[in-house]
Image: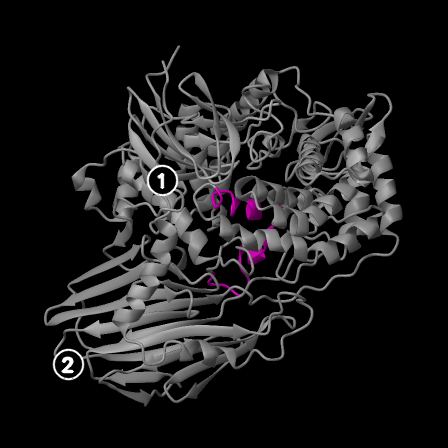
């Protein structure tokens, strides 16, 4: 029998909760390569350190430094799109794909790359090799520390991001008798560096007329003296402590990227003035407090790790884990690393994470380090609402707004209403098709996918002013595109999507007895699911705002007749409308699972047939080599959790941590892509709490521990956020579950746990405690 203690008021709304465990990534050697280094970020500025001795490299980034892309909208694109659709409807898929590629994707271009802000070098000139090295990153505070022990003393480098001051600070200190003795350089293969007193200034511009920028490195020598080096760098001699400050300024105009800012060059001086005269103790405490303010909103404990394992370096723990040993503390650390990266690489106002978050070593990053909109960018923001970082969703939400002019141009050029977007864009927000291959480029649902984040943000925040003033116009604009793009299949008596793809897969079909491959068709399951999401979001938003206009009436008329994905003869959910065979049965994308996660069209309560079909599809994918990239494996964790298969979800965790994580916890595609880090954090949350389902009667289902694996028999989580405005604390073991649920606004819920369902109505600010016994069978 459930025990509901309605008299117990647990006032934890807005309360910061203790992190509970040590959250430190550590190593006893320098990182062997860039993507094994230690990440520091202020939300705008990024630094990655290797922890090398005597030579250290600092990889410097600023999130608005991009090369510029150029493209032209081809004349007659609307005519071509009509022909593509006609060919696809007629079953001439290869011809449809060739026409799209030749006439719409050409000339081939990619979103030009995200670029770095410079590489700084620190060469320690004191003689002698270190006897030992200890490198660490404390993700609960953001403090990066590198310590080298010598026969005659210790030299330490510590770095911290200062979010409000917009500077990254480093202290270099020593106890060695000779004091400090190091050379500081700043370099870039294309752009120039000048010396201004104790400051190195790199002035440059992204390729092809991209972002103009200045990178500043200011050295404060303490009791030492600064000399000019032969290489144009700086040499510090003497003293026991020196401070190094990195900041940058750019001419990037968030409101209009095609127009440069004109008053930007003095901003770096303003940022550095904010740290003038401040001592390290003050700065370090401030930077750590800024990170703690975010990190301490959430704590998680999934079990107990052997004390001996806790003393190992992170890479040793990963190897031990890969050998089959338990390490719930490592799973917690990777979880919190996702939250740390979200804080370090986002501000409420600013550009969103790219494929590498904020950190890059290249002028031509993998996949240009762009914003991939067919899952990757969206995955970067999956965990922010659920783990207490909702304000950091803003960069993505603002991007949807900023995409509108180019997205409307694309839709009009193709003969549609509203706005649409190709699969990849960059900071200049051109939305035309890119990439040169229809397999990924011939997709029109990318704008709709990212627009779905607007309504979901409202479900968490309940911010009606945001919904009405900001989200509603964009949700309508997206729905206009969907409704103009749908076409009616007279034979089937239903609306279908297309032409489009199932990103980024191909199918095999017969054309007059000849086997052919293609990507483009109509009515792909992925497209249908996102179309359902778009129209449902429009209707839900309209109901919240009390609006019923012509667009809403059209959506209400179309939605009941919208086609759904089909279940094949083999019991799998088909990717395409026809029972085509995949060219890659183990493809990394599982786009036809969108309606289960991150979408909300289907769920285990109401859609048993579809649940079984997608389970069969995932099993088939994995049996044929699927989930071989970090982000794909992370997506599988989330979907399996929604399908209530806890051991399958946890099996994907074991694989990801064992095979797809670097010693610094960077997720690997490979190469490094940060989306898998965020997807993993989201996946763990989805195993512990789900709130996507809303019953027809109006109750929001809060499912507690819906996919709890046997590996986590007891644990505690504080600070979970649910849609509808609830904050949830959980504590469990094999005998009982205790849930503290606090309402940030009034709501009607059905709390489900261990086979039981409890109706719950809470007023704004009210809290209750629920107890559930052992699972019922």
Residue placed furthest toward the left: 152
Q: Name the foreground residue: 508 vs 612.
A: 612
Q: Where does the image place residue 663, in percent across and percent down from the top left?
A: 33, 49
Give the residue displayed 74% in from the left and 44% down from the top. 476
468 w.r.t. 605: above or below: below
Which span is picked out in magenta?
360-385
Residue 544 lies in quadrant = top right
Give the residue displayed 43% in from the left and 46% down from the top. 667
Q: Name the foreground residue: 580 vs 24.
A: 24
Question: Which secondary structure lies at badge 2?
Answer: loop
Main SS category, magenta section: loop
Instruction: Answer whether residue 768 is magenta in the image.
Output: no
Question: Which secondary structure lies at badge 1?
Answer: loop
Give the residue displayed 78% in from the left and 61% down from the top. 72
Marks 1 and 2 close (CB-CB < 8 Å): no
Q: Where does the image place residue 80, in percent across and percent down from the top left?
A: 86, 46
* Disc number placed over residue 563 in the picture, else none: none
The C terminus is located in which quarter? top left
Disc 1 designates what residue? 11
Neighbour tally class for label 1: few under 14, some 14-19, many 20 plus, Cα within 10 Å: some
Instruction: Answer whether residue 375 is magenta in the image.
Output: yes
- Decide if residue 196 is on the left or right side of residue 101: left
The N terminus is located in which quarter? top left
Disc 2 designates what residue? 178
Q: Where does the image place residue 597, in percent across and percent down from the top left?
A: 56, 33
Q: CA distance from mark 1 to mark 2?
A: 56 Å
- Decide if residue 61 is on the left or right side of residue 712: right
Neighbour tally class for label 2: few under 14, some 14-19, many 20 plus, Cα within 10 Å: some
332 w.r.t. 71: above or below: above
Q: Where does the image place residue 553, in percent across and percent down from the top left?
A: 80, 34
> Of callouts 1 and 2, which one flags the residue occurring earlier in the amino acid sequence?
1
């Amino acid at each position: 029998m459930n025990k509901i203690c309605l008299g117990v008021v647990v006032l934890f709304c807005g309360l910061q909760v203790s992190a509970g465990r040590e959250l430190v990534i550590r190593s006893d050697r320098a990182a062997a390569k860039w993507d094994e280094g230690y990440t520091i970020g202020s939300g705008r500025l990024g630094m990655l350190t290797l922890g090398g001795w005597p030579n250290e490299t600092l990889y410097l980034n600023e999130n608005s430094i991009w090369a510029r892309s150029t493209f032209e909208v081809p004349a007659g694109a609307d005519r071509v799109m009509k022909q593509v659709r006609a060919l696809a409807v007629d079953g001439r898929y290869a011809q449809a794909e060739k026409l799209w590629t030749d006439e719409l994707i050409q000339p081939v271009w990619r979103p030009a790359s995200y670029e770095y802000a410079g590489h700084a070098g620190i060469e320690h000139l004191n003689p002698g090799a270190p006897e030992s090295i200890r490198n660490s990153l404390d993700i609960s505070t953001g403090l990066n520390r590198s310590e080298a022990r010598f026969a005659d003393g210790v030299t330490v480098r510590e770095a911290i991001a200062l979010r409000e001051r917009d500077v990254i600070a480093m202290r270099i200190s020593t106890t060695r008798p000779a004091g400090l003795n190091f050379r500081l350089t700043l370099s870039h293969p294309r752009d120039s560096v000048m010396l201004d007193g104790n400051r190195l200034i790199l002035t440059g511009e992204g390729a092809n007329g991209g972002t103009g920028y200045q990178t500043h490195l200011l050295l404060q020598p303490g009791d030492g003296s600064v000399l000019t080096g032969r290489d144009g760098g700086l040499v510090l001699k003497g003293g026991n402590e020196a401070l190094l400050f990195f900041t940058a300024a750019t001419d990037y105009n968030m409101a209009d990227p095609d127009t440069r800012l004109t008053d930007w060059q003095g901003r770096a001086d303003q940022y550095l003035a904010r740290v003038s005269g401040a001592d390290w103790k003050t700065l370090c405490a401030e930077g750590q407090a800024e990170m703690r303010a975010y990190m301490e909103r959430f704590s998680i404990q999934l079990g107990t790790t052997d004390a001996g394992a806790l003393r190992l370096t992170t890479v040793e723990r990963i190897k031990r884990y890969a050998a089959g040993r338990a390490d719930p503390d490592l799973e917690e650390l990777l979880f919190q690393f996702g939250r740390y990266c979200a804080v370090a690489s986002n501000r409420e106002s600013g550009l969103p994470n790219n494929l590498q978050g904020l950190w890059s070593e290249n002028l031509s990053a993998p996949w240009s380090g762009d914003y991939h909109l067919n899952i990757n960018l969206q995955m970067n923001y999956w965990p922010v609402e659920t783990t207490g970082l909702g304000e950091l969703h803003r960069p993505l939400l603002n991007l949807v707004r900023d995409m509108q002019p180019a997205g409307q141009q694309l839709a009009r050029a193709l003969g549609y209403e509203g706005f649409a977007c190709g699969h990849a864009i960059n900071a200049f927000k051109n939305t035309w098709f890119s990439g040169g291959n229809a397999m990924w480029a011939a997709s029109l649902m990318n704008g709709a996918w990212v627009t779905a984040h607007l309504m979901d943000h409202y479900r968490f925040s309940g911010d009606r002013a945001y919904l009405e003033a900001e989200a509603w116009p964009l949700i309508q604009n997206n729905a206009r595109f969907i409704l103009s793009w749908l076409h009616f299949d007279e034979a089937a008596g239903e609306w279908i999507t297309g032409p489009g793809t199932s990103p980024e897969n191909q199918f095999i079909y017969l054309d007059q007895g000849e086997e052919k491959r293609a990507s483009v068709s109509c009515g792909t399951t992925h497209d249908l699911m996102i179309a359902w999401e778009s129209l449902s979001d429009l209707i839900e938003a309209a109901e919240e705002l009390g609006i019923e206009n012509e667009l809403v009436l059209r959506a209400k008329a179309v939605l009941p007749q919208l086609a759904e994905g089909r279940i094949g003869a083999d019991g799998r959910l088909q990717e395409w409308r026809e029972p085509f065979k995949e060219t890659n049965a183990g493809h990394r994308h599982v786009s036809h699972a969108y309606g289960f996660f991150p979408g909300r069209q289907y769920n285990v309560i109401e859609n048993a047939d579809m649940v079984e079909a997608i389970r069969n599809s995932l099993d088939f994918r994995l049996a044929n080599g699927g989930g071989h990239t970090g982000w794909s494996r992370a997506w599988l964790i989330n979907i399996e959790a929604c399908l209530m298969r806890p051991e399958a979800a946890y099996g994907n965790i074991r694989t990801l941590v064992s095979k797809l994580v670097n010693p610094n916890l960077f997720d690997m595609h490979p190469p490094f892509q940060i989306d898998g880090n965020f997807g993993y954090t989201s996946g763990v949350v989805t195993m512990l709490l789900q709130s996507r389902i809303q019953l027809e009667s109006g109750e929001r289902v809060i499912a507690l521990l819906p996919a709890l694996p046997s590996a986590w028999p007891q644990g505690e989580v504080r600070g979970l956020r649910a849609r509808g405005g609830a904050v949830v604390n959980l504590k469990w073991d094999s005998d009982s579950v205790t849930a503290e649920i606090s309402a940030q606004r009034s709501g009607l819920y059905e709390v489900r746990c261990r086979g039981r369902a409890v109706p719950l109505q809470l007023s704004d600010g009210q809290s209750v405690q629920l107890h559930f016994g052992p699972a019922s069978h």
